[in-house]
Amino acid sequence: MPSMTISAKQIVSIAAEVFGSSTEVESCSEILPSSECGIPKVCGCNANQSFRVRLRGEPQEYVFRFPRGHRDDLYEKERTNYRLVAANTDIPVPRVHRIDRSKRLVPVGYMVMDFMAGDEATFLSHPQNPRTDQQEKDEIQEKTGYCYAQVHNISREASSPRSAIDRLLYNLQQLENVVKDGPFRVSLTKIDQCRAVVEGDGDLLFEPESLCVGDSEFHFEKIDGEWNVAFVCDMEWVGFDDPCQDLFMLACAPRRLWGFDRPFALDEQELATRACMRGYEQLREIDYARLARMALYKQLGAMCSCLDQVYRPEKRAFMKSREQTYVNLVAAVAGLGLD
């Protein structure tokens, strides 16, 4: 076994603890970020150290996962989300065999769950991926959209219908604090106009709220010439919210919303033709006009949220380099009140 932060001996001890004292570990390898043809294939691995473990005499492989300590782990929440998806959709999820926080065998908590085969949807459907042709990419994207809709159909009464408004008002306060503290060209008057728009926009109130996909990943496998979802994973940091939180990330894919240097403009007609949206609308309707507004709000929130440590020189330099983006974005959101 390779050299690990978590030792081979500790992996063996955990396997015996979870699956029985007679269990033998046949192989163990750390799951590391990787790419293929210049396209990210396995991402993440920052918050957790994970190992693919094979036990002697068993066809099923397992994932042993350990938090790196960069942030709180939410393993119990992840297990709950898997159970919700399993109970309400036909999307496969990994079975969680053990969550242990005793620190008796290792100095951190850990989770053991099934390893499931398949490649991530964004990797398979990437425009530059030679492993799939355009028809296959469209098939994967359409089925991914349908998976999103299934997850969004898991809903509950909103715990705080104003949460989106409150988040944006907080973000605008972050921006105002920075503008007041330095020679930035963002207009304080425009920031006030943004506040008025946010407070008065009924589209920001939503009821009920849906389970969101967030940073979760859908993986696909090709069987008998057809691509089908193999499983969803990494549901540790997702919860219930406005489903538009997911849809505008699909809308700007493959780029990230905060990567745009100008206000995000959603082409409603073009977006409706995308395979992922067609798949979604097989199950749920999309209000594209509302989605366009929500995407602009989300971009504003994302850009402002990075200012929470503006006292750091590199953060201040970032804002200065993107100053015109902030100017244009605030003007665009303020302009929503003129519609």
Image: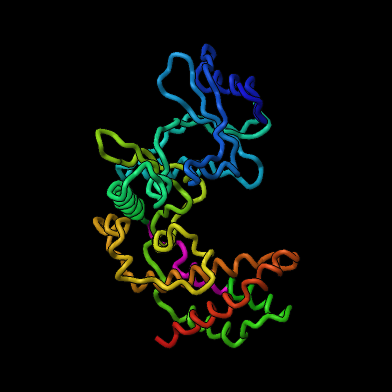
How far across and down, in percent of the image, does residue 24 sit? Answer: 53, 14
Q: Residue at x 29, y 70 (%)?
A: 269
Give the residue at the far top of this rendering. 22
In the displayed structure, 199 sits above or below 315; it is below
Q: In the visual, does 123 lie left or right of 133?
A: right
- Quadrant housing residue 330: bottom right
In the displayed structure, 2 sits above or below 269; it is above
Q: How many marks?
A: 0
How far across and down, in percent of the image, does residue 94 sit? Answer: 42, 35
Residue 297 counted in the magenta span: no
How far across and down, in percent of the image, does residue 65 sit? Answer: 56, 34
Residue 157 counted in the magenta span: yes
Which region of the structure is painted magenta? Answer: 156-169
Colour logic: rainbow
**Camera sees residue 135:** yes
For the C terminus, the image quarter is bottom left
> Residue 152 versus residue 131: which sits nearer the camera?
131
